[in-house]
Image (cartoon, rainbow, N blue to C red):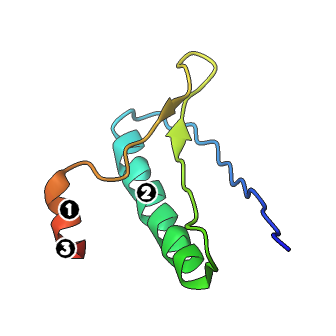
């Protein structure tokens, strides 16, 4: 019997300095990768799926690319 669940973690930040958003995005991506790795270790048959996005009342929700550069993926080949 399959027991599929979707988990959601949401955090809202309000920085006065716009330059902090890219730093925070990098931290979010790092932690998302940790969660994905844990899910991969615990998986049974189906691979887990991960989606990371950001947005605000003024900026439409957009998905964040987890691999900014294909060279990052070479470590896993």
What residue appears at the point 48 percent right and 75 percent down from the top-left corner?
37
Image mark for residue 21: none
What residue appears at the point 53 percent right and 19 percent down from the top-left corner?
59
How dense is the environment of label 1, judged by Cα within 10 Å: few (below 14), some, or many (20 and up)?
few
Does the residue at mark 1 contact the one at mark 2 (Cβ under 8 Å)?
A: no
- Residue pointed to by mark 3: 75
What residue appears at the point 55 percent right and 79 percent down from the top-left corner?
38
In the structure shown, which secondary structural element does the residue marked by tag 1 occupy?
helix
Q: In which quadrant of the rendered view does residue 72 lie?
A: bottom left
In the structure shown, which secondary structural element does the residue marked by tag 2 occupy?
helix
How dense is the environment of label 2, judged by Cα within 10 Å: few (below 14), some, or many (20 and up)?
some
Is 22 drawn above or below residue 2 in the view shown? above
Return the residue found at the far bottom. Answer: 41
In the structure shown, which secondary structural element does the residue marked by tag 3 occupy?
helix
- Residue pointed to by mark 2: 29
Q: Picture coordinates of residue 68 (x, y %)?
A: 25, 48
Residue closer to the observer: 30 or 4: 4
Q: First in sequence, mark 1 or 2: give its number.
A: 2
- Residue pointed to by mark 1: 72
What residue appears at the point 39 percent right and 32 percent down from the top-left corner?
18
Q: Is residue 11 left or right of residue 61?
A: right
Q: Is residue 2 left or right of residue 53?
A: right
Q: In which quadrant of the rendered view does residue 6 lie?
A: bottom right
Q: Is residue 45 left or right of residue 24?
A: right
């Amino acid at each position: 019997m399959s027991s599929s669940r979707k988990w959601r973690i949401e955090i809202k930040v309000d920085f006065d300095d716009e330059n902090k958003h890219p730093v925070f995005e990098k931290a979010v991506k790092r932690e998302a990768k940790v969660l994905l790795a844990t899910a991969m270790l615990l998986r049974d048959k189906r691979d887990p799926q991960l989606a990371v996005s950001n947005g605000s009342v003024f900026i439409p929700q957009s998905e964040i690319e987890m691999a900014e550069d294909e060279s990052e993926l070479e470590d896993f080949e």
